[in-house]
Every structure is written in C-alpha cells, then in structure tokens.
Amino acid sequence: MNKKPPLTFKLSDLRKRIHIPRKVQAVLIFTGWIGGLLLMASLCWFFTQPVRGRFLQRAVNRVLEQSGDPHRLGSLVPGASDTLMMGAYFTVSSAGDTKFSPQENTSAARACVFTFIAEGSFFPCIVLLSSEGKVLEFLPLNSHGERILRQVSPGVLKLYTRRIEGAKS
C-alpha cells in the first residue's frame, strides 16, 4: 500500500529541497524590509491626510490673521488635490465667520495652498480662486515671498495662473 505523506510541513524540509545562495537570501531579506517600510510609510501618509490638512489650515489661518488679511481658510475640499498641481484646496471665508463657509462679501470661493518656485527660491503661497476656477490673486505667506513676488516677471505669474486654472477645469 502506498503510504500518504504527512500533512505537517517543516521549514527544514523546504531548505533541503530548495537551495538559495546566501547572497540571494540577503538581497531578498533586504528587499522585503525596504518593501515593508515603504508600505508602512505609504499607509501612514494616506491615513493622516485629514490631520495634516487641519494642521495646514491652522498654520495658514494664523499667518493670515497676523498679516491682517481678511480671508480665512475653511474646510479642506475633498478630491480637489487629485490633479497634477500639487497643493491643498480649501474653501475661503471672511475673518468674522465661524462656520467657515464661502461668504457673499468674499469674491473668492476656494484657495489653493502650494509652494511657489521662482528664480531659484521657493516659498509658501496661496492663490484665491473664483467659483469658475479663475485665479483672483496670489497671497505669499511670508515677507520673503512678498519680496520675490514683486520681483518675479509677469510671465512666470501667467504660467502659474494658466497651470492652476487648467488644473481646475
């Protein structure tokens, strides 16, 4: 009679059948570690997006308040950042509004917070958008940005304007 092999499996049995050189084993283990770390980092990045959005909103609103600007960022617009233009889109409200909804006295409906890169330097910037997606105004978030924005050529501003308006349409 044929005797059936046992259903238990031992790792030592596998090692006897398959011979993997030590260098290949080391590379596979290293690749597994790197893959695991990348997986964990991407999961953390994905699941902390709302928290990072709130931190960004608070920081930008604090800067706008200190500079005396009447605009305030409201809620994060979900799905609006899924374009080639990397930035976070928020609703805009007036300074006295506590519900953070677009106001009639505020001509901007949305704002995009992004990094402006020009002439070898970069700085945080907000662009105010109308409800049709047209750029209304660029607001730098620091004094260095104000100085650079005054010096930058109109062509660079038009380039950013076209890119932002194209991403919103």
Image (spheres, rainbow, N blue to C red):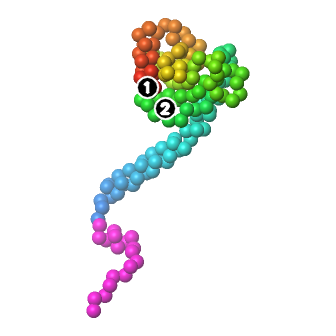
Percent position of residue 127, x then y: 53, 19
> Hey, what amino acid is under mark 1?
Ser
- Compared to 99, does 142 lie above or below? above
Residue 81 has which mark? Answer: 2
Span shown in magenta: 1-18
> In front here: 124 or 15?
124
Residue 158 has which mark? Answer: none
Percent position of residue 55, x then y: 62, 32
Q: Mark 2 packing: few (<14 Cα in 10 Å), some, or many (20+)? A: some
> Which residue is pictured at 31% across the width and 88% down the height?
3
Q: In the image as oriented, which residue stretches furthest toward the bottom?
A: 1
Q: Is residue 114 left or right of residue 93?
A: left
Judge depth for marks 1 and 2 and give the one in front: 1
> Which residue is pictured at 50% across the width and 28% down the height?
87
Residue 169 has which mark? Answer: 1
> Hey, what amino acid is under mark 2?
Ser
Q: Main secondary structure of the magenta part?
A: loop
> Which residue is pictured at 27% across the width and 92% down the height?
1
* Numbered-mark total: 2
Q: Is residue 65 magenta?
A: no
- Compared to 32, does 143 lie above or below? above
